[in-house]
Amino acid sequence: MCLRISEERDSDGPTHTGLFNLYLDEFDESWTSHIDSVDYLILNADHWFTRPAVYYEDGRVVGCRFCRLPNMTDLPSAYAYRRAFRTAFRAVNSRRRFGGAAFLRTYAPSHFEGGLWNEGGDCVRRRPFRSDEAILEGVNLDMYMIELEEFRAVEREGRKRWRLLDTTQATLLRPDGHPSRYGHWPNENVTLYNDCRNPSAPDNFTLKNGDQPEYIHPYLIKSSQSSLTICYPSLFKNPAFIYQVFIADLTVSTLNNPNPNSTHVISSFSDLSVTLDFPSNNLRFFLARGSPYLTCTVVTPVSLSISTIHAVLELTPNSSCTRYKIRLNNNQTWLLYTSSPINLNHDISTITSTVFSGVIRIAALPVDSPKIESTLDQFSSCYAVRGDAVFTKPFSLDYRWEKRGWGDLLMLAHPLHLRLLSDTDCSVSVLEDFKYDSIDGELVGVVGDSWSLKTDPVSVTWHSIKGVEESSCSAIIEALINDVQALDAGAVTTPSSYFYGKLVARAARLALIAEEVSYTDVIPAIKQFLKQTIEPWLEGTFGPNGFLYDAKWGGIVTKQGSLDSGADFGFGVYNDHHYHLGYFVYGIAVLAKIDSAWGRKYRAQAYALMADYMNMSRRENSNYTRLRCFDLWKLHSWAGGLTEFADGRNQESTSEAVNAYYSTALMGLAYGDSHLVWIGSTISALEILAAETWWHVKEDGKSLYPAEFARDNRVVGVLWASKRDSGLWFAPAEWKECRLGIQLLPLLPISEALFSDAGFVRKLVEWTMPALARDGVGEGWKGFVYALQGMYDKGGAVANVRSLKGYDDGNSLTNLLWWIHSRDQQPDECDRLCWFRHYSH
């Protein structure tokens, strides 16, 4: 250490790692006295400056870090870090006889996974990160920038031969080389401190007791009391809803468990998988999404128990006792595979084994078919232990499975996967006749451990794709003038982050419409309104509410949400984050576009808001969880937050989800961030395709859903992991105008891609129209119905819009007229695809 440290001030300290006195402007003579004799001198510092210390300058205390002493200013680590480098550089430059080369080796980011080094974090990574899997951010970026700034300063002095050894990017990608928990004997009575540092695991495994079923296609999986239950669910259906019925088909546990009431531990998880450990019975389950097998490793020899709520009719082994066929009295047949021989016996409802260790795989036989049974046999020896989703280029997503065992990997693809799997990808084979049923449609077998999913491009533009009819501009301008005159930031009374964000985005729409119809006189007034409404939220000066950073869950919450879990629609418990923040991001992107100086001033806050739901990093020390809302296997978002439900996660409005990612891409356009443009555009495209696949209910044999449901519904109300509901959170199923509107709002240029199927749109509007005759229908909801009517009946839609007495709080007459008059009565499908053609908008 080049700085002078006095005796340890407190051997325990506030974090039980000691408390030191650190003299930031005094170098240690025992170190500097050796400088003259070396040819190469390498300086580095890194993570020790996060430890508790009391800071001295000029011989007096100036503050501390994590000391928790009375009347002491707590200073950030960056304060000491910068001054330490200045002192070290001064020490080297003061040595007149030193003629060697001096290097600064830059910051090496931390690599602990699953917690901090002293809180159970571990070094488990077996391969480096790829370049698109890790980004430099947060404290890592801050420390790195301090080093560069101080290095440039000493370099300009020119007194010594300073060289920069910049290893930060390389060390950002490396797996950590520390000893991890293996620095202790297994039975040593110590807290396991590791030398190295979680996106979100499935909700129902993490919240409360973690004992609600989680849908890991094709099975419902439930963990409870040292056991894991697998269910191949049947489907209950009627005109109002569809749901998968959880029944305890098979429950895996052990005999003679010393702690039968203990729960599971999530030992690791990735974009496409989660690993559950049961320490009390030495079982580990690799739950890979889309695996037709449940895979369990028995870590140490134990006797297994497999029970069922049904009756076991037959248990038939093969000649080597490594494969058993289990037939139950509910007409289900299951196959069980083991990595070595196992002896199984059964009574009416329980199968038990002799002592066994190794790998067990269990698969439901979806239909009584020798061909499917043979396929399961063929691929039973290869299993996935994790899966990563990697955005490699615009409108492309790769799945990369890490596998064990031998042979090829067999997984299942849902209907959207099959639509996107690249025809030119020779690394996978689709088994058309190998299928499992699911609420999401048939799951089809895919052989291969690397998938390439490619979607058609979607235009992300500021304005409509084909433009507004010139003859209609005057009508739009008239409405625009009136709507802008009504803008009054002082009259905004709502403290709700959701409704406030909608008002911001509504005003931002007016600015872009003004550009499109070439009436820019109103833009200064809109700009003023946007500044007056957005800045208090970015600066923390909005009295009734505001944004706060929540370090526990790694995200942004509102003041009201942090105090009341029901406030702001549950924003404080992470409900609807992409909805609320998407509106703000849209307003910020537009304001940054029309006022670049303002954009530069608030860039950091803008990116912080956006990162809450758009963080791409896998790093555990990231400020935000990875893609908080977007499900990289289902390829759409979930709006539910930290609340467990028996039916799993849920999402109501796909259009507000699309808005969030579309707004992200617009922010990229505003700031010249091409990476943000293509990531936002790609996820927008995937969200749109998922909406078309699972929320838009087709008929005439085109629906994925049973006829009982598809016959009476054109859109799903709330989509759950294991349920499809015709009703909404805020309205019954009969309020069809709300069901249509919540899948369309906010009305944007990207809505053209979301509702590109004109035939479906007509059927949707015709299905909805009779509901408008009901007493009490909101004028705002009517406006969205008329907007879609404008895609095939422009005159009727304009007349209906003109008759409205009010509009949704995120909509306006200007926006409705803009939409209708920018519709093409015969839309060209190519316009949806040609993203590059419209990039200049």
Image (cartoon, grey):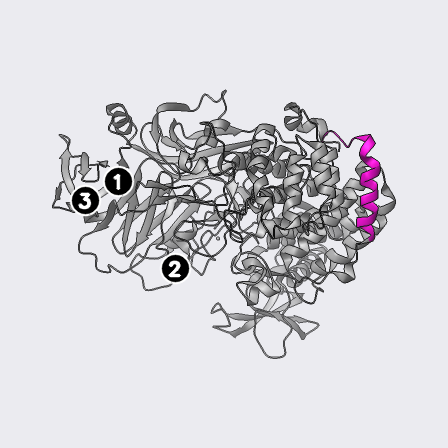
Calculate the distance from the C-alpha at mark 2 to the C-alpha at mark 3. 29 Å
Q: Nearer the viewer, mark 2 or mark 1?
A: 1
Which residue type carries mark 1? Val
Q: Secondary structure at mark 1?
A: strand
For the residues bearing labels 1 and 3, Cβ distance under 8 angstroms: no
The residue indicated by pointer 3 is 356
Q: Which residue is mark 1?
A: 359
Q: Quadrant of residue 594?
A: top right
User: Residues under labels 2 and 1: Cα distance?
Assistant: 28 Å
Magenta stretch: give its range. Answer: 464-485
Q: Position of residue 744 (x, y in %)?
A: 61, 41
Q: Secondary structure at mark 3?
A: strand
Nearer-N-terminus badge (2/3): 2
Compare residues 793 and 476 and report the one nearer the observer. 793
707 on left or right of 310: right
Q: Quadrant of the C terminus?
A: top right
Looking at the rendered image, the disc whose residue lies closer to the viewer, 2 or 3, is 3
Q: Determine the main secondary structure of the stretch shown in magenta.
A: helix
Q: Nearer the viewer, residue 717 or 214?
A: 717
Q: Mark 2 — residue?
A: 192
